[in-house]
Image: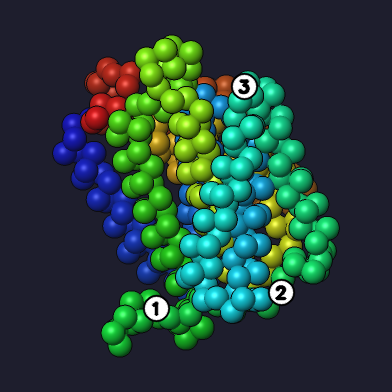
Amino acid sequence: MSKSKKLALLAVLLFVYLVVLPLGLRDKPYFLGVITTASVLSVISAGVWLIFYIGRINMGQGAFALVGGYTAAILISKCGWPFWFALIGAGVATVVLSILIGLPLLRLKGVYFSMITLSLTETARLAAQSFPSITNGAKGVLNLPLPGAIKIGGFTLVPDFATVDKHLAFYYLGAVMLIVGFAVLYRIVNSRLGWLFRSLQQNEDLASSFGVNVPRLRVIAFAICAAFAGIGGAFFIATQQCVYPATFTVQDSTNYLLYCFLGGLGSVWGAIAGSFVLFISFEMLQGLREYQPLIYSLIMIGVMLWLPNGLLSLKMPWSRKENTSLPAEEEDA
């Protein structure tokens, strides 16, 4: 597909996402909430995708989302911070934590790194229960206020969520997070830093022999990954107005992996495709009750069998005549 066609398709998708869907679903808060959740799941999963990009498998993204959620909740409830500063604080806290953890942890490779990160989410949950003076233990932090207004010079940039349709307000906040998050990720992948990240996936020893600071690059990627999760976790506690130790579990960390796998690891946009298709599919199957997990699992197995390179490997009618093996972002680089 030519660059002009890609831009036209992107413009159409953005118009549908930012105008058609919110206007069409504004009187249906449940469906609006499903799209909002899928947007933020895409952002959190994007961090996992970046770790795939350097040749690692991160199974602990839920831990950073939980840390981000608790950080924002504590800053709001105990320190009196506005949500918007708490959102930034959640990102900073997860970045600091990821650096402290990543310095020793990222020396591990393969299954050893994956298994250690798998334990991070459960460790975060137990830590949230073990310090009740800070986290309120198993009770969690409740009754958090909705995000307030942002005003500059008497001009209201963002209205108080309590004075408007909160479902629509959170939808647009999630949309901004998704657009900004993936714009940042796309820019990283298509920059010099992105090519250095790619060299780690190919051969770390060879990259090191050419003067690449491999340990530093690993930590940078892990910090960006954690920041995405921390900000996403803070968003979720704002929508729910509470946070518990079980708000993010090992199952959530596994789902973030699945979104990336089934969307496609060959493109930045794989996390979006996987998150939206799988999460919305899961919600659409709610009416089947006890059969929901079974049918959902069959869908995932089917996608993995027939589209092993992800949903984005599915050839669209306008791209059938093209023969290229490079992902879109590498062709444009």
The numbered disc on residue 109 is: 3
- The reply, left or right, for residue 14 in relation to residue 165 is left
- The kind of residue tagged 3 is Lys
Q: CA distance from mark 2 to mark 3?
A: 39 Å
Crowd tier of the residue under label 2, counting other residues whose Cα lies within 10 Å: few below 14, some 14–19, many 20 or above: some
Point 27% across, 46% down: residue: 10
Residue ID at (64%, 55%): 67
* Viewer-proximal residue among 142 and 295: 142
Number of marks drawn = 3
Q: In the rendering, at what x and y percent does residue 303 appear?
A: 55, 29
| 10 Å crowding of disc 1: few (<14), some (14-19), many (20+) | some
Position of 327 relative to 272 (above/below): above
As measured in the structure, the alpha-carbon distance from the residue carrying label 1 to the one carrying label 2 is 23 Å
Vertical side of 278 occupied by 195: above or below: above
Mark 1 in CB contact with mark 2 (< 8 angstroms): no
**Residue 49 appears in the picture as rendered:** no
In terms of image quadrants, where is residue 169?
Answer: bottom left
What numbered label is drawn on residue 150? 1
Q: Which mark is in front, 2 or 3? A: 3
The residue wearing badge 2 is 142
**Given the image, on which type of amino acid does mark 2 rest?**
Leu
Can residue 3 be seen here? The reply is yes
Q: Secondary structure at mark 1?
A: strand
Mark 2 or mark 3: name the one nearer the start of the chain. 3
Q: How many angstroms separate mark 3 from mark 1 (CA)?
A: 44 Å
> Left or right of 179: which side holds 1?
left
